[in-house]
Amino acid sequence: MPSTPISSLLPDLTGYSVDDDSIHLLNILGIGAYGKVYKAWDSRTQAYVAVKCMPTYEPGSRTAEMQDAELELHTILSDHVSVVTLIRQFVEDHFVFVVLELCPGGDFHGALFRHRCFHRDARKIKKVFGEILDAVDHLHQLGVSHRDIKPQNILCDEAGTNIRLTDFGMSTREAWSDHACGTRMFMSPESLNHARESYSTRQSDLWALGMLFAIVVSQSTPWDSAMLSDEDFAAFCENAEYLYQVFPGITQPTFELLEWCFFPDASKRPTLAEFRDAMNAIDCFAVQPTRVKVPSSTPTGEWEVTAPSIDCEKTPRPASVPVFAPQLPAPATTSSASSINQGSSSSSDSSSSLPFFTSDSDTTCSTPPTSPVEDSTDGSMSECVLAPVKPPQCPPLTRLPTCRQFMLPKIKN
């Protein structure tokens, strides 16, 4: 990841229209290392969408090839119900715009830690994790490994259901790889072992699923990285029952499944089908919530997973990029235009907001729920009741300045 996130150099395009004035950028949902994501209104489909904005790069550069590969893979994968749909993409005024399905509930991280959507609810955990397994199985069936499975790369609705896997920047078609990438906390020990020649990218996904499952059922993690230099992981390697110390509330069947997922020999870990069968056979995952590793800086007393993604390729990403032109001037506003956000579902009240995603640089931007959630009191799953879609009532928005008015230098590799 570059030392200065490219996204911090991108201008704020809130209030501008792109794609022949069919896409109206309403507000920022999130900021990643390489782009900004906006909530937008698509007048073609008469629906709210998410729009990711990224800079263009010098044609033929490694960075441009990586961007093209990510978009190509996402296009191929997005026909599955549990993968975020890539609706279309276009280039305008030195920006790449990717129009995506909008997930109103934000990311899985928020559902887990801020809204406790799965608190001791085995039935809901099975349903939601089954959707995650479906998404990963879809990738593997098409010969693609995600390599960065974590809560921040899974989106959902306000109830924490209707899962959508996203962010394919680390994904690969290679079955075996000789370099490590992903988020260290979710990376397999063989991928972190620099002495090895190569590792299975598919098995690395399965390890990440095991770690994600541990987080869902316990609200915590057993270690920071699967390396012997990590005291917790070393203790587990010495005695698997160490899991009972870090997850004192888990049941015996849950312990056995986690022990299987974290088996040192990658070839002996469960397949996706075996994982699903073992999980569905468990009646109760934990009898009490687990809280460990509580940092004093966390006011809620909850331990949250916000580890950044890393890329340990032999050829590193560029350490710096040319400085961007000054930010665009804010478009002219009127009283009717300023009321859009006040009356729409994207209020700026941060006290009840959900993160759209957490970026590689751990920058979190939030948007509140856009529809009410009906909570059940009989132990059944909460279902999301979506509010009717209404177009923003506003005058025509200012169009993005042309290249003559605002010129971004093309970023070289």
Image (cartoon, rainbow, N blue to C red):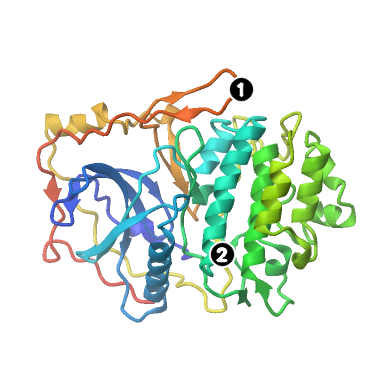
- Residue 83 visible: yes
The residue positioned 46% from the left and 46% from the top of the image is 357
Residue 152: x, y in percent?
A: 52, 48
Category of crowding for the residue at label 1, using alpha-carbon neighbours closer than 10 angstroms: few (below 14), some (14–19), many (at least 20) = few
- Image quadrant where residue 59 sits: bottom left
Residue carrying label 2 = 140
Category of crowding for the residue at label 2, using alpha-carbon neighbours closer than 10 angstroms: few (below 14), some (14–19), many (at least 20) = some
Identify which residue, 12 or 165, lies in the foreground. Answer: 165
Considering the numbered disc 1 on the image, is that residue within a helix, a strand or a loop?
A: loop
Residue 316: x, y in percent?
A: 52, 74
The residue positioned 58% from the left and 71% from the top of the image is 312
Identify which residue, 253 or 157, lies in the foreground. Answer: 253
- Type of amino acid at the residue the image marks with label 2: His
Residue 300: x, y in percent?
A: 60, 29
Q: Are marks 2 and 1 in contact (CB under 8 Å)?
A: no
Whether 225 is drawn above or below 333: the answer is below
Residue carrying label 1 = 379
38 horizontally vs 111: left or right: left
- Image quadrant where residue 182 sits: bottom right
Considering the numbered disc 2 on the image, is that residue within a helix, a strand or a loop?
A: helix
Name the N-terminal-most of marks 2 and 1: 2
